[in-house]
Amino acid sequence: MATDDDSVTLRPATSEDASAIADIWQAGWRDGHLGHVPDALTAVRTAESFAIRAEQRVGDTVVGTVGGAVAGFVMVVDDEVEQVYVAAGHRGSGVAAVLLAEAERLVATNGHEYAWLAVVAGNARARRFYERNGWTDEGRFDYPAATEAGAIPVPAHRYLKRTRSA
């Protein structure tokens, strides 16, 4: 279901949102990451792992709702935009741009001049989205994806955007 940007409502996530966040996160992660990350990471990114992490991360998550239902979310920690995901039915509707703008605002509010994020090297759709929204590809690096067994290096691109004047 497509929507206008104006119909997206942003609010802090609550524990009641965790299930919807986990579902959106898992589906979006699979769309953008399968075939582009090490098999060891794919093996540990189970439905249960997304459910656990969504519940643990409610405190640094903002959801975008459309018609009262969670349509997407963003997670921000310090100067990093860690996660931006939109439910498949809302992709292309402007929800992602609203969430990304909120992430940029939060990074600036946290006192940082620049925001950064990592995009899996093979996720061309996400990379185009960030570039359309003014983010600059600063090059390849290995992102340390956290797992219970320790970090797994994932080939990614580091994107950067100025969020406020120095």
Image: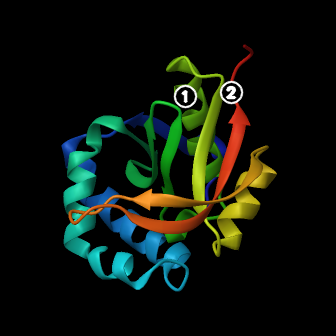
Q: Amino acid at mark 2?
A: Thr
What distance separates the C-alpha of mark 2 from that of mark 1? 7 Å
Q: Position of residue 145 (x, y in %)?
A: 40, 61
Above/below status of 33 relative to 19: below
Q: Residue at x 21, y 47 (%)?
A: 56
Label number found at residue 163: 2
Q: Quadrant of residue 90?
A: bottom right
Q: Residue at x 42, y 73 (%)?
A: 27
Q: Nearer the viewer, residue 47 or 42?
A: 42
Q: Which of pointers 2 and 1 lies earlier in the amino acid sequence?
A: 1
Tell me the crowding category of disc 1: few under 14, some 14 to 19, or many 20 or more residues within 10 angstroms, Cα based.
Answer: many
The residue singled out by tag 1 in the image is: 107
Q: Position of residue 19 (x, y in %)?
A: 24, 59
Q: Is residue 14 left or right of residue 97?
A: left
Q: Nearer the viewer, residue 142 or 100?
A: 142
Q: Are marks 2 and 1 in contact (CB under 8 Å)?
A: yes
Q: Nearer the viewer, residue 23 or 2?
A: 23
